[in-house]
Amino acid sequence: MKALLFCLSLFFVSVSHATSVGVVVTLVGDAQWQRAGEVISLRRGDSVVAGDRVTTGMDARLVLRMNEGSVITLGADSQVVFSDWQYQQGSENNHARMELVEGVFRFVTGLITQQPQPDLQVATPAGTIGIRGTDFWGGYLQADVLDVILLEGEHALVISNDQGEVVIEQPGLGVSVVAGEAPQQPKAWSDEKLARAVRSISLPQ
């Protein structure tokens, strides 16, 4: 028992000394993070560090505020990995990479993209989303098809994979991508599809 308590104390000390890159500001339902081989239930106010794998449960919603002001909302049955997140105020070498394993998210960027050459990406199984500073939604409304839509902002989104690249410059346009195929050209979504996307990350009233 003493050995177990000692190991647990070492684990929580290591967690407490990890550099926070974001914090849970809203949580509806269940969510977990996986860190250093441990799976722990998330609570409001908990920190996220680079390398964390965050997973939401059925009907859950999770809102993270990152250390430079970006706001990331995860919908139900979603999983992301913060594989890299480096931000220092005043630096022009800030960079971050989030991996979408499954599910849906909304990303409103903060200060991390406010440098001459923004380096912020969301990697997915179908392709990579390059972000220059904006408000956008991405995820899987149907299996094996990544959808991305620019909601607001004057900066473009770049969606690319080994088969091709497209740029979304106009809010309200979206792109669909199937793994192994070039991204489709941007086009306006139907009201029904946009409503589905919005519902997937909306908080309960």
Image (spheres, helix red, strand yellow):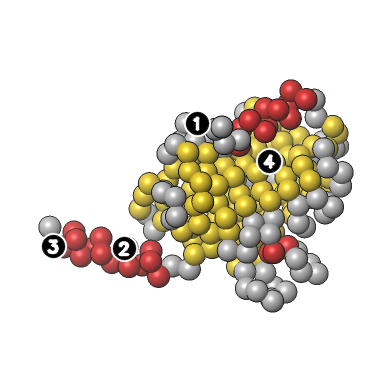
Please tell me how crowded label 4 is: few (under 14), some (14-19), or many (20+) other residues with Cα within 10 Å: many
Q: Amino acid at mark 2?
A: Phe
Quadrant in which the N terminus is drawn: bottom left
What residue lies at 55% left-to-right and 33% top-to-bottom?
204
Q: Nearer the viewer, residue 30 or 131?
A: 30
Q: Which residue matches tag 1? A: 59
Q: Position of residue 172 (x, y in %)?
A: 82, 37
Nearer-N-terminus badge (3/2): 3
Q: Nearer the viewer, residue 125 or 63?
A: 63
Q: Amino acid at mark 4?
A: Gly
Nearer-N-terminus badge (1/2): 2
Q: Which residue matches tag 2? A: 11
Q: Which residue matches tag 3? A: 2
Q: Position of residue 164 (x, y in %)?
A: 81, 45
Measured Cα–Cα span from mark 4 to mark 3: 46 Å
Nearer-N-terminus badge (4/3): 3
Measured Cα–Cα span from mark 1 to mark 2: 30 Å
What residue lies at 80% left-to-right and 29% top-to-bottom?
189
What residue lies at 62% left-to-right and 52% top-to-bottom?
71
Q: Which residue matches tag 4? A: 138
Measured Cα–Cα span from mark 3 to mark 2: 14 Å
Q: Nearer the viewer, mark 1 or mark 2?
A: 1
Please tell me how crowded label 2 is: few (under 14), some (14-19), or many (20+) other residues with Cα within 10 Å: some
Q: Amino acid at mark 1?
A: Asp
Q: Position of residue 177 (x, y in %)?
A: 74, 36
Q: Amino acid at mark 3?
A: Lys
Label 1: element kind: loop
Nearer-N-terminus badge (4/1): 1
Q: Nearer the viewer, mark 4 or mark 1?
A: 1
